Amino acid sequence: MSVDVRAVTESDFPGWLRALLTGFLRPPHTPDGLVADRLANADLARTLAGFDRDRVVATLRSFRQEVSTVGGGSLTADAITQVTVSPTHRRQGLLSRMMGADLAAAKERGDAIATLIAAEYPIYGRYGFGPASWATEWSVDIPRAGLDPRRTGRPEDGGRIELTDGEEIRKIGPELHRRLAGVRAGVTDRTTRGWEVGTGLGYQVDPWKEPFYAVHRSASGEVEGFVAYSADDKWDDTKQPVTTASVRDLIAVTPAAEQALWRYVCSIDWITRIRSGFRAPDDLLPLLLPDPRAAKTLAHVDMLWVRVLDVVRVLEGRTYPVEGSLVLDLRDADDLAGGRYRLDASPAGAACVRTTESADLALDIAELGTLAFGGESAVRLTRLGRVEELTPGASARADLLFRTPLRPFSPDIF
């Protein structure tokens, strides 16, 4: 029998949730509290399922999202999440049908981009998504790092570190997050629910363990960052601490706050190792250590994937460091945003229009999603064969326009 793909109803939702848990290899138990919590936060019109008779065998959900662009602007995104296909129904085109329906609806709504966090790398390029931000996790050997224990706990900018709690973080965190989006591209907005769940409120699937919270205030008393961390409290057979602190969240909107918070975590008694959690690839952490080799890279991974739906809004919605022009020939197999566009950019602004002029660069729409947020090199993609240079020097010109001093960073997984 054919599988029907459609939006779910409220009565369908428990089965949809069970299929979701099955797809992610989580115990497929759906207590009433879990169903009620997830249902209250789902837009059923954007919650799709594949139905084999009355059983849900595929899931996909999307929601409205704001994503920061280069220069501190933002784009409205169709954020796609909770994508699964049951193991009994793989390789039957269900993902393509759900993705096609969702992206068509996003285009119709006028969303500029679609976004997702890819559980597996090879899947989403065929739908026009390209990785736009990356993240790095480090493990820091504190004894080797060489930090002066007499200085690391005291900010060098004349500010101070204060311990606090989740209630305070819910008050100060949203504004810090918005300020971070003003200086980093690729930051996705964190909702009120996100702040609540991240600080222990609301329904929790796993038992909640309260972390430690510390806030950095400048010399004038302004909050410039916070860190949330946990510790495993381990000791060896000789009664020496071998405790690891794991950073759950760290937002800093000034270099002084970023340095002060890392130095604070590195100065805590009994902590001999730090796991940084996923950070921007150009985070200050390794290089603020007297011995940067004490920071071992545990992972360097793709984070936010972007699918461009409106080329004009994406290219006009960011800033550019220099003046320049490019004609881009964009290939789009799904015919959502392809065509030839001329970009005229300068520090004063940008204009992007369709054109019949000869192209400087030819590329798939997925590569534009990778380039538009400033985290990748057009020269590098040209050398890989993923961008075709039709005008000599056009790739280098694209790098001058698109690359950014700060790498894009997406601290939230959705």
Image (tube, grey):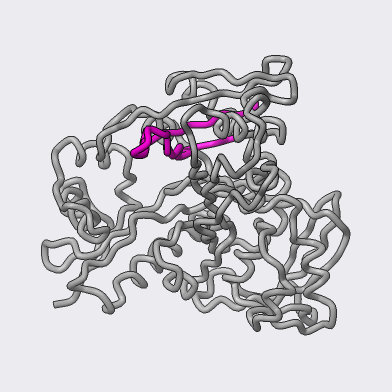
Image quadrant in which the N terminus is located: bottom left
Is-magenta flag for residue 287?
no
Give the x, y percent position of residue 76.
55, 48
Q: Residue furthest right?
A: 323
Give the x, y percent position of residue 214.
53, 24
Q: Residue furthest top?
A: 220
Q: Residue at x 67, y 79 (%)?
A: 387
Total of numbered circles in the picture? 0
Front residue of 149 and 411: 149
Tell me where the magenta segment starts and ends, as one range: 224-251
Is-magenta flag for residue 247?
yes
Q: Is residue 347 above or below residue 336?
A: above
Q: Is residue 43 above or below residue 325?
A: above
Q: Residue at x 77, y 84 (%)?
A: 390
Q: Residue at x 45, y 64 (%)?
A: 104
Front residue of 339 and 293: 293
Classify residue 164 as left or right of residue 397.
Answer: left
Q: Which quadrant of the figure has residue 66?
A: top right
Give the x, y percent position of residue 154.
66, 22
Q: Residue at x 14, y 40 (%)?
A: 31
Q: Residue furthest front?
A: 238
Q: Which quadrant of the figure has residue 133?
A: bottom right
Classify residue 102 as left or right of residue 387.
Answer: left
Front residue of 5 and 120: 120
Please tell me whether the stretch drawn in magenta is mainly helix, strand or loop. strand
Give the x, y percent position of residue 315.
70, 59
Q: Is residue 247 above or below residue 225?
A: below
